Amino acid sequence: MTRTTTWWRYVLLAAAAIVFAFPFYFMVVGAFQENPTNTPDEMFPISGWTFGNFTAINARIDLLGSLANSLIFTAGVLLGTVTFGLLAGYALARLDFRGKSATWVLMMLVQMVPFQLLMIPLYVQITRSYGLGDTYLGMILPFGINTTAVFIFTQFFKALPKEMFEAARIDGASELRILRSVAVPMVRPALVTVVLVTFIGPWNEFLWPFLITKDTSLQPLAVSLANYISNAAQSTANPNGAILAGATALAFPVVILFLLFQRYFTASDIGAAVKG
Amino acid sequence: MTDIAAPPARTPSSPGPRAGGPLRNRLLGRNPIGSLFALPYMVFVAVIFAFPLGFACYIAFHDYFFTAPGVEVERPFVGLDNFADVLTDPQVLESFRNTAVFLVINVPLTAVGALVLASALNAGIRWAAAFRVAFYVPYLTASVSLVGVWMLLFSSGGLVNSVLGPLAPDPSWLVNSALAMPSIALYVTWKQLGFYILLYLAALQNIPSELHESAATDGATTLQRFRHVTIPGVRSATTLVLILAIITGANLFTEPYLLTNGGGPDGASTTPVLLIYQQGIQQQNPDTASAIGMLLVIAVGLLSLTANRLTRET
């Protein structure tokens, strides 16, 4: 590629990167401003910094409580996904058992059926039949085992050399032991990928916890912030600042996790997981 | 557990793992414990997907309503009545029209934008990782956060309008019935593009570089190589991008709920999923809500098949 053909790539990419990053800049700066600006010439403020927006939103939606709820919701999903996902992924990749092809068919079904179609029956099932409305368990259950994670585990386990497993079996190790002491240590990168992919689901989820939590003390931050945006914002002195402060609190845990672990988040993993 | 772990191929009575082995192996597989390992996942899928899927069909074909727990009531089979109700409801028809507007803007913009940015990134440029992060972060971030930001940016007195000055639309973006749905389409394109860029990047890496080199030797310009080498080379990724964009677009809820305050103005940005929520849960009509859901899934299936057909090699 010659030098003359590359400069426009940088111009294109830089312009796109500004479009993609600007709303984040606006969000973070606005979250710490006494009066977030709406005019372009005040885009680089030098004064008026404050933590007041966080205090203001905290007075309305209990920021820490909501963050804790988001964390419990996410941790529950992660626990279910890692425990049962590892077991299922290992079985699908390395074991020959009855029902294996049925499991594959079920996984395809899960990838194809949109959650929104299941919204009404799941709502009836979980709130009426199981009585789990307004509980953490009811929030976690529909996301309990992330199918994408099962795909990722299966692929990583398949890539391990066959001899390793045969040797462990000849030594008389049980399958559970092989999984724990041989297979899992070999797929640490898969674990990080799965944690990242799974984390963003429940952490960012709005619709489901919104449907089943009426009790505000149980609502994750995505739900309480949305309620604040659609109802309460009018009655706050600086609603824009408070909204941006809430948005920052919800966005940052994920952004930081991603920046720390982004090398585990590669195109091939995601593509493979989506394509199955 | 050790007898399961012992490879059966070692006994003379079973000549090899492929040849069958004892009856137990044929019935349960060589590692029956695998069923136990996969069981929690299978139970999960049965309870959380398969059962609700069947239940959704049941609700859609019956006169279903909510009752107090434990109360036995008759919910008669009504055939296609719910579907007839839904298809004659102007609100529902409008929500499908709105989705069509959304898809017409979002799907081409997504496919073209993602492919152009992915090929620019793939050309071995500096700071590629930093660019990738910038494109990917909106995809990772909660829609509720970003909707909050966009709402302020696109409000009547917001930054976008103050930059546009006299060119600002009146009424403003999100409260203008002609612009509400296109604004949502732009927002979703922006939010999801990073994910599709990653899909295209993976596909681009599978195009052998010899193809580009020989085309360049033959005197093909950058644009010609993009048209004749890159686009055919990522065809299967394009199919996937189109189908995923269609599915995402058909399932909009958070954006019209928050960005345009519940599908406003006057239903101009109502979506089918928003109606499922309003009719099924707010107005307690789960039967028509389920009928909307089934129609939506059928429509998405047909569109996906068309997208698959259109991008298939000829």
Image: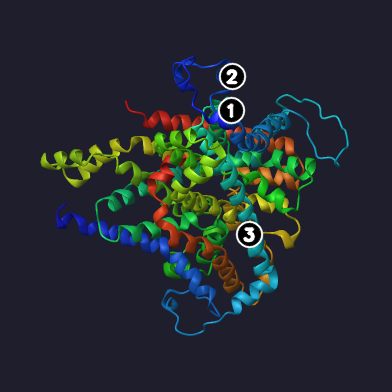
Tag of residue B24: 2
In this rendered view, identify the residue nearer to me: B93 or A90. A90
Crowding near the residue tagged with mark 1, few <14, some 14–19, many ≥20 C-alpha atoms within 10 Å: many
User: For the residue marked with disc 3, what is the amino acid?
Assistant: Ser
What is the secondary structure assignment of the residue under circle 1? Answer: loop
* Marks 3/2: CA–CA distance: 47 Å
Chain for numbered disc 3: A
* Marks 1/3: CA–CA distance: 38 Å
User: For the residue marked with disc 2, what is the amino acid?
Assistant: Arg
Residue B220 lies, in percent from the top left, at: 15, 42
| Any part of residue B17 in sight | yes
Residue A252 lies, in percent from the top left, at: 52, 65
| Any part of residue B169 in sight | no
Residue located 57% across and 24% down the image: A98
Residue B79 lies, in percent from the top left, at: 73, 24
Chain for numbered disc 1: B
Q: Are marks 2 and 1 in contact (CB under 8 Å)?
A: yes
Of labels 2 and 1, earlier in sequence is: 2
Chain for numbered disc 2: B
Q: Quadrant of residue A167?
A: top left
Mark in the foreground, 1 or 3: 1
Residue located 62% across and 44% down the image: B273
In this rendered view, identify the residue nearer to me: A110 or B264. A110
Q: Are marks 3 and 2 in contact (CB under 8 Å)?
A: no
Q: Which residue is mark 1?
A: B32
What is the secondary structure assignment of the residue under circle 3? Answer: helix
Q: Quadrant of residue A248?
A: bottom right
Q: Is residue B264 above or below residue B231?
A: below
Q: How is the image coloured?
A: rainbow
Q: Is residue A20 above or below residue B72?
A: below
